[in-house]
Structures are given as C-alpha cells and as structure tokens.
Image (tube, helix red, strand yellow):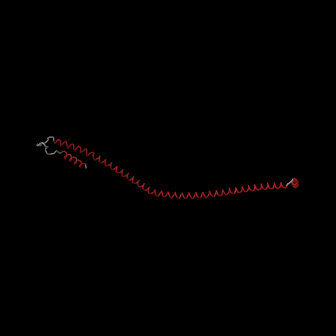
Amino acid sequence: MKRLIWIAVLGGGLCLGQESALPKSGTTETSEDPLAVWKWANFVLLIAGLGYLVAKNVPALFRSRTEEIQKGIAEAQKVKLDAEKRAADMEARLAKLGAEIEAFRIQAKGEMEQEGRRIQEQTAIHTKKLEAQAEAEIEAAGKAARASLKQYAADLALDLAAQRVQARLDANTEAGLVDNFLTDLKHQGSKN
C-alpha cells in the first residue's frame, strides 16, 4: 500500500513538474536552462519529502478515522436496536392495552353489579329493620293509646259512679254506710 502511494506521488510530481517542450510564443530560439537539472532535483526531493510525510501520516489518520466511523456505526446500530426494541415493547404494550382496558371494563362491570347486589341486600335489611321498628312503634303507640283509653274510661266510670252515688246518697244513707263500715272493722279487728 505504501509503495502504491509513493509511486502515485512521484508519478504525479513528474507529470506536473514537466515543462512544455514547445517554444514560448514570440521567441523562435530554444535554449536550455542550465539550472533545469537542479530545479528537477529540487522538485523530486520536494515531492519525495511530501510523499514520505503523506505516506507516514495519512494511513494512521485514515485508520483512526476508519475506527471512529466503525465505532460510530456500531454505536448507531446499538442505538437503533435499542430503539427498535423499545418500539416493539411499546407496540406490544399498546396491543395489550386494548385487552387490559377490556379486562378492566369487565372487572369494573362485575364489581358494579356486585356492589349493586350488596346495596340492594343492605337496603332490604334496612327496610325490614325499619318496618319492624315501625311495627314496634305502632304497637307501643297502640298499647299506650289503649292504656290511656282504659284510664280515661276508668276515670269516666268513677266520675259517673260518684255522681250516681251522690245522687242516691242522702245524710241518713251516708250515716248508715259509715256505721256498717265501722262494724265491719270491729269484726275484723276481733278476728285477728
């Protein structure tokens, strides 16, 4: 590889460094420059030096640049594979998302139905408790009303009896009743 570079540099230098053999326009005589050989030697040395420097530095530069490019390509491939993997994961998650949403809907519907049944059961239990409590309150109110009614009836009966007794009772009858009561008390006192 180095030889090809040297040959290319030298050949290019020789081709570019040649002067035309044609005479310059306006002059008819051809004269040779006595320093032409030294100019050519100087040119060849310059091209050789440049060729040496190029041959020495350019391959290392190309190698390092090639390595950098290969590293960049390898990193880009890794990034590309990672991005493709993440994209595939996202697509899989998106595909699963529809199924997850449907499963969530089914689960939520089941939970709502179960909660509805539980609420209905609790409502039925509370309704029964309220009905039993209302019946107990009605029964208690009925008992209280009956007791109050009995008390009122008893009060009325006593008032009526007191009115009748007072209507029939005169002073002689009252004295006779008191005497009879006292005699009964004496009899009972003597028995004890």
- Does residue 119 appear to the left or right of 192 in the view shown? left
Q: Nearer the viewer, residue 75 or 103?
A: 103
Image coords of residue 54 (percent x, y): 25, 45
- Does residue 61 appear to the left or right of 33 in the view shown? right
- Does residue 176 appear to the left or right of 128 in the view shown? right
Image coords of residue 41 (percent x, y): 18, 42
Image coords of residue 160 (percent x, y): 80, 55
Quarter occupied by residue 118: bottom right
Quarter occupied by residue 112: bottom right
Q: Residue furthest left?
A: 29
Quarter occupied by residue 33: top left
Image coords of residue 181 (percent x, y): 86, 54
Q: Residue furthest front?
A: 167
Number of numbered tags placed on the structure image: 0
Q: Nearer the viewer, residue 163 or 99?
A: 163
Which quadrant holds the C terminus?
Answer: bottom right
Q: Nearer the viewer, residue 133 or 101?
A: 133
Q: Residue furthest top?
A: 35
Q: Nearer the viewer, residue 70 or 30?
A: 30
